C-alpha cells in the first residue's frame, strides 16, 4: 500500500486536477465536473483547476495522467459522476 499524502492547509494559489474516471461512460454527467470547475472559478479564483478524463474506462489505468498530476498538480479530486 502507498499511503496518501498529507492534506494541504489550503488551496490558495494551487493547481487542482478534477478527474473523471468515466464510470458510466463518457457522457455520464460530465457536467457535474464542469460545475465543480465553475464553482472554483467563482468562489476560489486563485485555484487553477484542470478538468480531465482518464483514458479508456473506469477499469483502465492512465499512468500518463497520474504522472502529469504528480508533476504539475498540488491536489486532485478523482471521482465518478452518473
Image: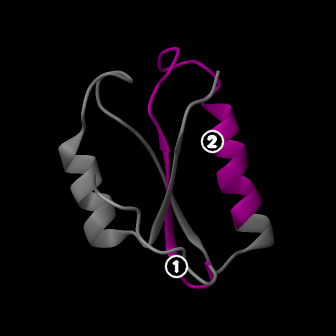
Q: Are marks 1 and 2 in contact (CB under 8 Å)?
A: no
Number of residues whose C-alpha sits closer than 10 Å to that of mark 2, classed few (under 14), some (14–19) or many (20 or more): many
Residue, disc 2: 33
- Give how far across and how far down residue 12 sits, in percent: 63, 84
Residue, disc 1: 14
Identify the mark nearer the N-term, 1 or 2.
1
- Residue at 35 percent across and 61 percent down: it is 3
**Residue 45 covered by magenta stretch:** no
Q: Please say if 3 is above or below 24.
A: below
* Structure colour scheme: one colour
- Give how far across and how far down residue 23 sits, in percent: 50, 21
Segment colored magenta: 11-40
- Residue at 48 percent across and 15 percent down: it is 25
Mark 1: secondary structure: loop
- Give how far across and how far down residue 71 sits, in percent: 26, 70
Side (left or right) of 64 relative to 15? left
Amino acid at each position: 500500500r502507498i499511503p496518501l499524502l498529507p492534506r494541504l492547509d489550503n488551496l490558495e494559489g494551487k493547481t487542482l486536477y478534477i478527474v473523471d474516471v468515466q464510470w458510466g461512460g463518457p457522457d455520464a454527467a460530465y457536467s457535474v465536473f464542469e460545475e465543480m470547475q465553475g464553482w472554483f472559478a467563482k468562489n476560489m479564483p486563485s485555484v487553477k483547476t484542470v478538468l480531465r478524463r482518464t483514458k479508456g474506462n473506469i477499469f483502465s489505468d492512465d499512468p500518463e495522467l497520474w504522472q502529469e498530476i504528480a508533476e504539475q498538480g498540488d491536489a486532485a479530486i478523482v471521482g465518478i459522476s452518473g
